[in-house]
Each structure stands twice: as structure tokens, then as C-alpha cells.
Amino acid sequence: MNGNIRVLIVDDHALVRGALSERLKREPGLDVVGGAGDAGEAIRMTLDHNPDIVVMDIDMPGMICFDAAREIASLRPETRVIFLSAFLHDWYIQQALHVKARGYLTKREPPEKVITAIREVASGGAYFSEEVRARIVVDRNGATLSEDAKSLVSTLTTREVEVLRYIARGLSKKEIAHIMHISAKTVDKHSTNLMSKLRIHDRVELARYAIREGLAEA
């Protein structure tokens, strides 16, 4: 890659976003082109600033970050995404790999590791925290979640997971239908599928399962 590496920071916490931006600005060869507060803004800023790397928090309100990463890849194929999260849930890792993210770091990592990840990914490689690497298998077909790390949640569709997350937040069927722009009947269908796949018999247990799996955050 010629010239400095252009980086966009995406985090809904202004203090985190600002602190990481200030640290990266002091690093030779890195240019922070902006900071976004949510995934939707990240897409708009990617189009405006054309960063080489997007460092994106996973746990943000609004648009799901994995959907944003997929759209960024479609609109700017040359832009690479590194996810940053306080959580190490298998579903998060699986979705990050599914949208072909080039990195996944925990927020426990020091800034120097983030810088190393940015440089590695910008040069065409990939970078994962050690705890993430322990859960994935890398072969000639790419990286996938290891069989040992897979759980029942990996059998769910993206829409089913979305319904499950809203159930965990205590939303009613009508509220979920309104937010997702689907009918209450479709929400019922997703709920039935969830209970069947997860071997759970009521909404209360669905909510408890989502909380245990870390799907209730953000």
C-alpha cells in the first residue's frame, strides 16, 4: 500500500473513539480520517473519506455492525474492516468471519495491538486476538469457527437472531414487528423457529438464553 494508511474509527462511546483516534494520530504512517458514532454513519463516512481500514465496535445501538460491514464491502471493496469488542461471543466471531472481516480484537488489547492489526490488515493479512484465534480454524478456504466452539446459536438465521435480541430486551411482538418492518405473524413464525432450534419452550427462556449468549447487548 502506497502512502499513509487511512483509518476510520467507529464507536458509539465518544471517549473511546477520541482516545483511540488520538493514539493513532501519533503513530507514523497512520492517518485518522474521521470518527463515526454508529454503523450507519460509518457507511456514510466510508463513502466520503474512502479509508483503507475501518476499526468498528460491535456493540452499538442502531444498525447492526455486521450489516454495515457487508455494505461497506459492497460499496468499497478495497476497504477492510477490523472489529473491536468487549465481548467474545461465538455468534459475534461467526458473523465477523461471515462478512469477511480481516480482524477481530478484544477491547482488553493495548493500543499497540490495534496498531499492529491495522498495519497487518493494510498489508493484505489478517489479525485476531489470541482468544479469538483459539476459537477459529484457518485453512486454504479461509477462517471459520471451530466445531468445538460452535453452539446452537450458530444454527440461527440473521433475522432469527435479530428477533431473539429484541425478545431479550423485553419488547412485545407488536413492537418487534414495528421495528423490523415485518408483520406480527412473521415475528410469531421466527419465535416458533427459535424455540424449535434452541429447544426452548417459552419467551422467558428465550430471553434468558439470549442474555447467556451475549445477544442482549447493544
Image (cartoon, grey):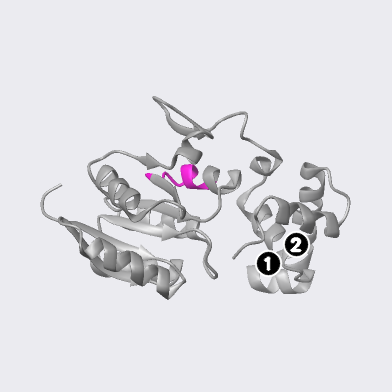
Return the x and y of residue 62 as percentages of the image width and height: 54, 70
Where residue 114 appears, x then y in whole percent?
34, 52
Judged from this view, the residue extending furthest toward the right is: 201
Q: Which residue is mark 1?
A: 182
Rendered image quadrant of residue 217: bottom right
Residue at image coords 71%, 69%:
176
- List x then y, in percent, for residue 14: 42, 75
- What residue is at 76 percent from the left and 69 percent from the top? 170
The verdict on residue 45 being magenta is no
Q: Does residue 153 appear left or right of residue 88 in this picture?
A: right
Image position of 153 (left or right of 184) = left
The total of numbered circles placed on residues is: 2
Mark drawn on residue 94? none
The boundaries of the magenta stretch are 95-102
User: Relative to 72, is 145 above or below?
Assistant: above
Q: Nearer the viewer, residue 134 or 202?
A: 134
Mark found first going from the N terminus, 2 or 1: 1
Looking at the picture, which amino acid does disc 2 mark?
Val
Mark 2 touches mark 1? (CB < 8 Å): yes
Q: Left or right of 130: which side holds 157?
A: right
- Look at mark 2 in the image and give the residue it sits on: 187
Q: Position of residue 116 (x, y in %)?
A: 29, 46
Q: Name which residue lies at 67% across and 40% down.
A: 155
- Say which quarter of the image contains residue 123: top left
